[in-house]
Amino acid sequence: MKICLIRSFYLRGSSERILLGTIKGLLKRGNDVILLTSYVNDDILNKLKAINIEFIKKVENLPTMSYQSLLLNDKKFSKMLTPLIKRIECDFILALDDFCLSIAECSRRAPLIYWCQGLPLSIPLTFMFEQRKLQSFLVKFCSPFLLTKIKKYIAKFDYVLSNSHYTKEWLYFFTGIRSKVLYPPVDCELFKPMKSDWHNFKYILTPSSQVEVNVIKNLAKHYPIVTFGGKNIDGCKNMGYISDEELVKLYSAAFVLLFPQIHEPFGYIPVESMACGTPVIAYDEQGPKETIVNEKTGWLVADEQEFMKKVEEVWQGYEIGIRQFCRKHILSKYSTEIFFYSLVQTIHYDDDNC
């Protein structure tokens, strides 16, 4: 099969790894992959070239989409993509983010699939405020007004997929559009248990961005915590942005991963951690509620107080079998092989039931 992937732009971090995992999953099954995007930095471009996919360089001149342009019904992105999409011969086209929804109005020669990665337009609202209750309020009550602006685009796709059951339910609640669940793939050949010098230390790992910083700060007073990502948290050993290879080492040696995030429709970081054999502590909400098997691959808690208590409890020790089950769990549900099989089955199932 020949598959075209479209995303308006790429950022470093988990969004980049979702892209690479998706491409590797498709290539591993013998598919040809074409990537259309409005922006990609040199680091990501080198990684794309390394896995030998067709990258259409002309698309680098496309305007980077924004939430404002979506709300204003800006169609520049779709107008500039239309000639390219018309020219491409492929089996289907997969749109990977919410910024390029206007391409649903493009004329095309192949079926167009929208893979919803969360609640469209709601995520930036949570980044403006750190208070958990205010974040939840904004997501629940502001998203419907924003979603009405893009509902017409989603309805024009040939297929609609969601990255979790949580996303599926909210997408239907706010738009009335049904979707099938397709979990993002993890590159289990990269993210796997690995020995390193980090195994000489007992520490807790956490991302530094979009987490409840006060929770991490309080825990750092009592436990050795290592962070990765774009922010520094007081009291922690902050590694900043690191390579995928170094991240695998951190995941593998960590005693436990903390994921105190509020709005996370899927949660790629916990899945990567479990792929490396490290259990996760997270809130019993949204994406992590689906990916973490409570008491088997991690622990799900109700609130901040319970989160703190669970860290204290887990730090005393847990059964070694948990780490082995983490790996088995990810291989059985989130590997690149499972991803491609699920993608094809979902499309064929819909075709058979039209």
Image (tube, rainbow, N blue to C red):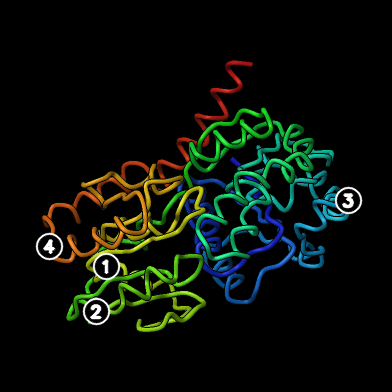
For image coordinates 48% across by 78% down, the residue present is 241
Question: What's the distance in space between the residues labelled 1 and 2, CA to CA?
Answer: 9 Å
- The correct choice, above or below, for 110 with respect to 218 in the image is above
Amino acid type of the residue tagged 1 in the rendering: Ser
Which mark identifies residue 317? 4
Which mark identifies residue 79? 3
For image coordinates 80% across by 46% down, the residue present is 102
Which residue is nearer to you in this view: 146 or 61?
146
Question: What's the distance in space between the residues labelled 2 and 4, CA to CA?
Answer: 18 Å
Task: Assign a secondary structure to mark 2.
Answer: helix
Amino acid type of the residue tagged 4 in the rendering: Gly
For image coordinates 45% across by 49% down, the residue present is 185
Q: Are marks 3 and 1 in contact (CB under 8 Å)?
A: no
The nearer-to-camera label among 3 and 2 is 2
Instruction: Report whether 271 appears left or right of 320.
Output: right
Q: Which residue is mark 1?
A: 252
Amino acid type of the residue tagged 3 in the rendering: Lys
Question: What's the distance in space between the residues labelled 4 and 3, CA to CA?
Answer: 57 Å
The quarter of the image holding the N terminus is top right
Q: Residues within 10 Å of mark 2 (few under 14, many from 20)?
A: some
Q: Are marks 1 and 2 in contact (CB under 8 Å)?
A: yes
The nearer-to-camera label among 4 and 3 is 4
Instruction: Report whether 102 appears left or right of 41.
Output: right
Residue 152 at x, y percent in the picture: 79, 35
Does label 4 or label 3 sit earlier along the sequence? 3
Task: Assign a secondary structure to mark 4.
Answer: loop
